[in-house]
Image (cartoon, rainbow, N blue to C red):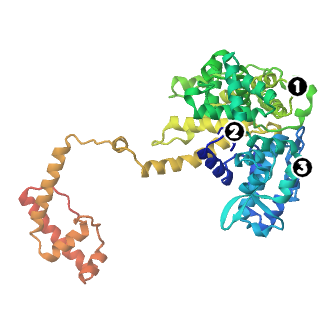
Amino acid sequence: MVERSAGVAGKEWSTAVQTLGETEMHEDYRDEKIKELRDQLTRFAPKAKKVEQAALAEKLYGEIESDRSYAFDYCCFRVTNYRPESPSRHSIAAADLKHDVRLLIEDLSDSADIVINEFMEPVHTVDELSKMFNVSTKTISRWRDAGLVSRRMLFGGRKRVGFLHSSVEQFVSNNRDKIKRGERFSQLSEDEKSEMIERARQLVEGGASLSEVTRQLSEHMKRSPETIRYTLKNFDADHQSLAIFPNHRGALTGDDKRSIFKLYTHGATVAQLCKRFKRTRTSIQRILLDMRLEQVGELPLDYIYNEDFESVDREAEYLGPVPQPATAPRKVRVPAGLPSYLAALYDVALLTREQEYHLFRKMSYLKHSASRLRESLHESEGSKTAIMDRIDDLYEAAVLVKNRIVQSNLRLVVSIAKRHVASTDDFFSLVSDGNMSLIRAVEKFDYSRGNKFSTYASWAIMKNFARTIPSEFKHRDRFRTTTEELFVACQDERLDPYVEETVQRSRQRELSKILNRLDEREQKIITARFGLGRGKEPLTLKQVGEELGVTKERIRQLEARALSKLRDAADEANIDVELGS
């Protein structure tokens, strides 16, 4: 969202800014560890503890220095007075820590549901601070990003943003220049705006860009670049026919930045991107750097840590060639019935224990090196491009090693799938599912324990089969999406279904005729014993006897007499039926 001051914005924009000040914009935590800590504290800590932890977090916030990084265990202790049960080596850059601790303070106060009169000091709202410092509510929002600690509390039953008086005084004492600049920013007169716009138009006619105009006017009029830039943008938005920069676009969205990075990776030059998105070369290069940092930050560099990796002098050993087996691998017989592309898996030689150990160690060391370089990106003051290039190279090398381990063990998946497949199973689905289990096993295997990977992977694959196969067939039986599955599962082998159904109906009519030869009690017995009624199940002699109030022996005698009558009737009608004796 483009920032604008109250002094240069219209009534509609002022209303929107005020609303922004009252409602909290959704922000994501930059560090997962701090986010997990937030989840634990807001969920389990009592109200009084949350208030205390918010105060401790604010104290930590004021002590963060911008030129260093902080251990997560230290930050956790400062906020909770407890150290984590399992120590970690995780560290956080100062900029990310300040951002996340500010959010932590707001989330703790938000979950505590604090009423303003519960505090022992005055509490200020966004509007009150705006009037106190003679600045816009949007400026207050920027001050929050710059270090003004805020909390969310209940004002008359409504949750709003508030500021403790002590927090405001601390911010003022540390940011006197920013306070003065904010006051000047909101006091821009109409004459100053007119002069600024006229000078900007003259500079543009001379060929100056927006950044050059902003810099020159800032120096000449003794105003901040923000004041110059937003005043010109507001003028262009309100007077499109007289716009100074008619082709200038607003703030680039996340999708715009991703498009720029994608086009660049597909061969577009920086000059072409500048022309297409109407940005300076510096802006495009900064966007490309930010997107590259984001991409590197998302690389999956999880690995099994080993203390040996700290020995830098052994790097050549870790990254050396794979040891060759003492004897040539013997030829493996390919199981019968496999398709050619599965049979080709048996052409890849199995790894020896020494080769397996070397490859797993190499993969973990490559990820370890890439992870350490990625952590140093936030602290690096020089060129970050070279570091990111090195990270990409290390990650690609780790992927190649991982692929070799996977390819050498794919036949293990086929072997286990053949043992688990049943007549109704889909063998190739099992192989595909097993391959995914194998890949996950490669990422989680700890080579330093001395176990063979095939043993670990076999258990992982079989455990996944045991978990997925029953649920898969249960789902398949309960949720059939098309009638085609029914036809595939149960093939119709009748030669002529119409003739079959006609014959069956004819038999039912003949059966009804011969049943009329029996008296009422005999009909009930035969119907009950053979389950002839719709939806009826055959009953035992005892059950039929209980219904008719006679013994089961008497039912057997009556049934035998009735069956004899039915056989005679069937012979007379020339009906081919099978009746029990």
Regarding residue 168, the answer to whether it shows in the image is: yes
Residue closer to the observer: 490 or 513: 490
Instruction: Return the residue found at the far bottom.
Output: 549
Q: Splitting the image into 4 quarters, where does residue 459 fall?
A: top right
N-terminal-most mark, 2 or 1: 1
Count of marks overlaid on the render: 3
At 86% from the left and 33% from the top, the residue drawn is 379
Location of mark 1 (residue): 315
Secondary element type, mark 1: helix
Of labels 3 and 2, the one closer to you: 3
Give the residue type that dot 3 points to.
Ser
CA gap, disc 3 and disc 2: 55 Å
Task: Identify the secondary structure beneath mark 3.
Answer: helix
Q: Nearer the viewer, mark 1 or mark 3?
A: 3
Q: Quadrant of the N terminus?
A: top right
Most extreme residue toward the left is 572
Local SS, label 2:
helix
Viewer-side residue, 380 vs 316: 380
Residue at label 3? Answer: 173
Q: As displayed, is residue 168 above or below residue 9?
A: below
Question: Which residue is found at the position 40% from the left and 47% from the top?
Answer: 480
State the mark number for residue 423.
none
| Position of residue 329 measured from the top left corner of the image (x, y, whole percent) | 71, 22
Residue under numbered circle 2? 441
Give the mark, 1 or 3, whose residue is nearer the N terminus: 3
Report how far apart the C-alphas of labels 1 and 3 lie in the structure. 51 Å
Q: Amino acid at mark 2?
A: Ala
Q: Nearer the viewer, residue 478 or 272?
A: 272
**For residue 309, what is the image quadrant?**
top right
Separation of disc 2 and disc 1 at Cα? 25 Å
**Would residue 212 be found to the left or right of residue 76 on screen?**
left
In the picture, measured across the screen, residue 120 lies left or right of residue 458, that is: right
